[in-house]
Amino acid sequence: MSVVRSKICGITRIEDALAAVEAGADAIGFVFYAKSPRAVTALQARAIIAALPPFVTTVGLFVNANACELNETLDAVPLDLLQFHGDETPEQCQGYHRPYIKALRVKAGDDIAGACKAYAGASGILLDAYVEGVPGGTGQAFDWSLIPQDLSKPIILAGGLTVENVADAIARVRPYAVDVSGGVEKGKGIKDHDKIRAFMRAVRTTN
């Protein structure tokens, strides 16, 4: 089994970003969606990224953002990877001169394999829990047995992951990476550094 990568999402403070990196996170996620309690401004994200050491991937999460809004953010913030968490088509995810991942909110009956093929230009597919009317960050897990084997894209597993269940999730799903936000928080957008360290230890035990 290959090494499972990790992303800590919903970062709003420099100290939380540094704690995540020190614990071994491969990527840091910033939410550019005003309705989220974890939303950051371009100014906030730029300050946090400036404090990061090298070899850490910075990810910007967007939900149905228009091209003008997205380009303004990219002009202001040095993001490495884009994460589209809304109803964006494959065409809408491209053209920003950045690799991207597409999030799918999983429910019974979804054609995950078909979605992987539809988003052929994506670097990976993120699988999250489906909650009606909520684009993500719900803290809820979904039925991992709904994920087909041998998908055509690297899979990033999200949705309700915690220190208690991440090792089991990795063993069952064998994802390329795991993505956590609420599972390592003490408040919306405020990370618990002990939880981050415990989560990363649990991920490493599976590698």
Image (cartoon, rainbow, N blue to C red):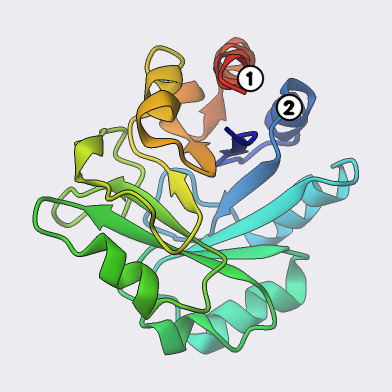
The percent coordinates of residue 42 (x first, y second) are: 67, 62
The percent coordinates of residue 132 (x first, y second) are: 13, 54
Relative to 193, does residue 47 appear above or below in the rendering?
below
**Residue bearing mark 1:** 204
Q: Is residue 125 left or right of residue 69?
A: left
Q: Residues within 10 Å of mark 1 (few under 14, many from 20)?
A: some
Residue type highlighted by circle 1: Arg
Residue 138 figure quarter: top left
Residue 203 figure quarter: top right
Whether residue 186 is visible, yes or no, is no
**Residue bearing mark 2:** 24
At x 73%, y 21%, the residue is 23
The percent coordinates of residue 123 (x first, y second) are: 57, 66
Judging from the image, what secondary structure is the residue with disc 1 in?
Answer: helix
At x 79%, y 24%, the residue is 22
- The answer to whether mark 1 and mark 2 are in CB contact below 8 A is yes
